[in-house]
Image: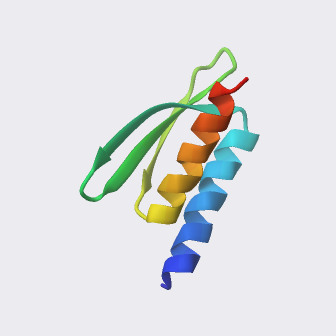
């Protein structure tokens, strides 16, 4: 799969979880990418973890984190 297709797939997964009411609550980076932890903001506190491998998707979730801090 082309790198851009991988990025779009990872970006769509991130956007899907954010639209479903999840927030990024943790990030663990290593040589194989980043493991991004999402926690649902409602009373269930459900957790999901995505393994983000592309550099562009790591930049994407980083920009989301930085924009959230401004508010």
- Residue under the image location 57 percent in, 78 percent down: 5
In this view, the residue farthest toward the left is 31
- Residue under the image location 67 percent in, 36 percent down: 67
- Horizontally, residue 67 falls left or right of residue 50, namely right
Based on the displayed image, in which of its 4 quarters is residue 20 positioned? top right
- Horizontally, residue 53 falls left or right of residue 20, namely left
- Residue under the image location 40 percent in, 62 percent down: 53
- Horizontally, residue 60 falls left or right of residue 32, namely right
- Horizontally, residue 48 falls left or right of residue 31, namely right
Residue 51 in percent (x, y) is at 41, 53
Q: Is residue 25 above or below residue 12?
A: above
Q: Is residue 20 above or below residue 3?
A: above
Residue 10 in percent (x, y) is at 55, 61
- 45 or 29: nearer the viewer: 29
Residue 41 in percent (x, y) is at 66, 22
Based on the displayed image, in which of its 4 quarters is residue 71 positioned? top right
- 43 or 66: nearer the viewer: 66
């Amino acid at each position: 799969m082309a790198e851009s297709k991988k990025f779009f797939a990872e970006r769509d997964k991130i956007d899907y979880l954010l639209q479903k009411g999840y927030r990024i609550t943790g990030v663990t980076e290593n040589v194989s990418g980043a493991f991004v932890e999402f926690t649902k903001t409602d009373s269930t506190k459900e957790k999901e973890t995505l393994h983000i491998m592309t550099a562009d998707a790591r930049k994407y979730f980083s920009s989301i984190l930085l924009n959230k801090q401004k508010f």
